[in-house]
Image (cartoon, grey):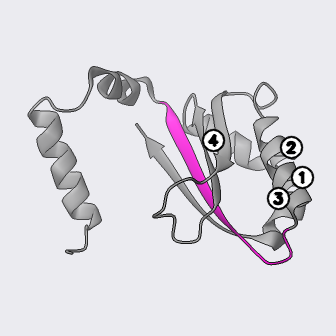
Amino acid sequence: MAEITRRTLIHSAGIASAAGFLPVAAHAQSQSGNVFHAFAFQWKPEATAELKARAEKDIAAFQGQIPGLLETHVGRNISPRGKGYTFGGIMRFTDQNAVDAYVQHPLHQALLQWLIPIVDAMELDLNA
């Protein structure tokens, strides 16, 4: 199977958009300035079931506590193509400034203190 490159995806998205294949909602969101923050974790062996549950609870609790955070969705990865990433989430922010503030927010920083040692994480931020 051919490897899909970023350039291929961007090109395909441009063709789809030009042809009118992207939903109207996608166009409206990109105009609004919303930023989506996606993350996925590979748990290290020392991550207990209790710590995994705490991560889900703590991340979900950001909703209503962090300015500019519009939506939070978090949970176990159910995709068979997860490549070892068994947990993740998606957050929608009002704009890039809200994402930048979230990164430094005391609640997020407190989570990172105990979470970073027990995960290998990947993150994406996208305007969509």
- The type of residue carrying mark 1 is Ala
Instruction: Give the residue furthest to the left.
Output: 19
Front residue (pair 117, 98): 117
Q: Residue at x 30, y 26 (%)?
A: 27
Q: Is residue 25 magenta?
A: no
Q: CA distance from mark 3 to mark 2?
A: 9 Å
- The residue wearing badge 2 is 107
Instruction: Give the residue furthest to the bottom.
Output: 45
Q: Secondary structure at mark 1?
A: helix
Q: Residues within 10 Å of mark 4 (few under 14, many from 20)?
A: many
Residue 113 pos. (x, y %) = 88, 62
- The residue wearing badge 3 is 112
- The type of residue carrying mark 4 is Val
Q: Are marks 3 and 1 in contact (CB under 8 Å)?
A: yes
Point out which mark residue 99 bears.
4
Q: Residue at x 13, y 29 (%)?
A: 20
